[in-house]
Amino acid sequence: MARPIEYISSIDDSKDLWKVAVRCKHLWSVTSSQNREHLELILFDSKLDLIQAIVPSYLVSKFKTQLEVGCSYIMQNFKVSSNDFSFKSTDHKFKLIFCGSTSVKKVQLSDIPLNHLKLIGINAIIEGKYRKNLLYDIIGGVTEISQAQIIPDNNKSKIVFSLTDLSKHHVQCTLWGKLVVQLNEYYTTHKADGSIVLLLMNARIKEPQGNYPLNVSNAWNGTKLLINDLSIEEVKNLKEKLKDDLPTLSSSSMKMETTNTSVFSDLDKFVWKAEVLSLSDIAYLQTETTCVTVATLEKFECGQSGWYYDGCSECTKSVTLKDGKFMCYSKHISSEPVPRFKLEVLASDGKLKYKFVFWDVDCVKLIGKSALQMKLDLMETGDFDPLEFPYELDVMLKKELAIRAVFQPNKASLSVIEFKADEVLRTKIKERFKCEEHTSKIVVSTDDTRDNMHTASCTPTISTSEKQSHADPQTVSDPLSITADYDPSVANSALTPSKRSIPETVEELDSAQLSSTKIIRDIKLEK
């Protein structure tokens, strides 16, 4: 006897043999930094419950042609995993992961509506009646465009405008990348349509922070933009009721400008939302801080492991062998682990030394070879010892770099997010360093000498005025939260926030890197 169809609300991780009747609400592709593509989709059933599903890289070719937005299906057999995305497309506790035995059959299911929106009103957004980590569908009329920058052939395009609905309240909306190009193309070809009403599906609500107001933004690949789509009843109704309150496309407020260059310099982008600090200043930090400094890489530190770790094939997290399978903390299964660089490097500015952790992507840039290729080359020679640091790694050393890294209190190293080798940029960063008068007040022991510098395993003695000046550095309470501003190479989930975030631009810090972020407190002064 065939298995009965069950509802999405019943799904949990007690079994894999789930059979559901669903419609595909949203479907998008995500490409990782390793150029591996996977699919993500949102499904809903006749009870209008939603759940997110993932098609792993190795199954994309099998299912990509079978799945289509708006179509209904009978699906069965999934791996069920916790809904652990940083930003969730649904509030379901679990997500579905397609596997080799997953069955997808396209059928006509009239009891499931063609559309289902998870709408939140602008008034509710202003009143804070939303979950910070949940993505929403938002409908609003465009009242004013305050900033527009269209940059051809890349994802740095940006537009800032105001949205309103029947509540007549306004909220700022910022779109990035392809959605900006989509809106601009609509504007140039549909001026006869008059005003604009947008539907943003899977949009992120960002709380006000400092000088930045409450803001609605796209979550990169996971956000869909529909413009004046009158086939959607909610859009049609809002456009009709707001027709006297919205500007027309011919209004000067709707004018967009196209530029071929960013208005921000390379330095502005590199130091965005970061403290520019010398190593001496970093020694005085007391709270979690993203900082930019300049230092020369001097030598490798021998840590608890060798020069690489066994990583997941789907993400950058480490894997462990469990029940004969390699699994990472995100519960991705890998047939074989992927070697990834993790190098602890002692760096100096001539006065102090700090330990920095360089991760896989940046190591590949500096070395010119992947950890996998280096390991294979050593194995071919028959002289492979996983704890022996290959001589080829030394190409990283003796380089002066501008480094963007994260400081976390009570840790043993700075975790590197990005580096630049440009000499002009390094010079400009050094010019921004603060006066280092306080370094003369650091208590130093001269008993131990090494590398022509002294090490003091002590706490800096700081005057009352200096404590005040260092007590409130610019901090990033959640480094991951700033990546949604600009994230061109995306590979996470709905957010897809996964990789690399103008002012409102900063590279994303990989979650695996964040979890391993450390800071050294040993202070070394020149003799």
Image (cartoon, rainbow, N blue to C red):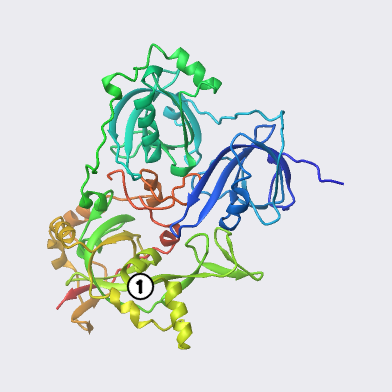
- Confirm whether residue 153 shows in the render: yes
Q: Nearer the viewer, residue 310 or 255?
A: 255
Q: Secondary structure at mark 1?
A: strand
- Residue 2 position in % (x across, y down): 83, 46
Work out whether residue 66 or residue 173 is closer to the camera in this orientation and state it: 66
Mark 1: few, some, or many residues within 10 Å (few <14, many ≥20)? many
Q: Is residue 241 above or below residue 207?
A: above
Report x, y in % for residue 326: 59, 68
> At which x and y percent is residue 230?
51, 21
Residue bearing mark 1:
344
Q: Is residue 294 above or below residue 203?
A: below
Residue found at x 35% / y 68%: 363
Q: Report whether 252 appears left or right of 164.
A: left
Depth check: 149 or 211 in front?
Answer: 149
Q: Residue at x 52, y 63 (%)?
A: 313
Residue beneath the point at 30% across and 58% down: 286
Q: Residue 247, located in which quarter of the rendered image?
A: top left
Report the residue that reaches farthest toward the right. Answer: 1
Give the image location of residue 336, x and y in percent: 57, 70
Count of picture labels: 1
* Side of 181 where 438 appears, left or right: left
Q: Residue at x 34, y 26 (%)?
A: 188
- For the C terminus, give its image quadrant: bottom left
Q: Is residue 305 visible?
A: no
Q: Amino acid at mark 1?
A: Glu
The quadrant holding residue 425 is bottom left
Q: Is residue 234 above or below residue 396?
A: above
Q: Quadrant of residue 514?
A: bottom left
Viewed as shown, does residue 256 lie left or right of 110? Answer: left
On the rendered structure, is 434 left or right of 50?
A: left
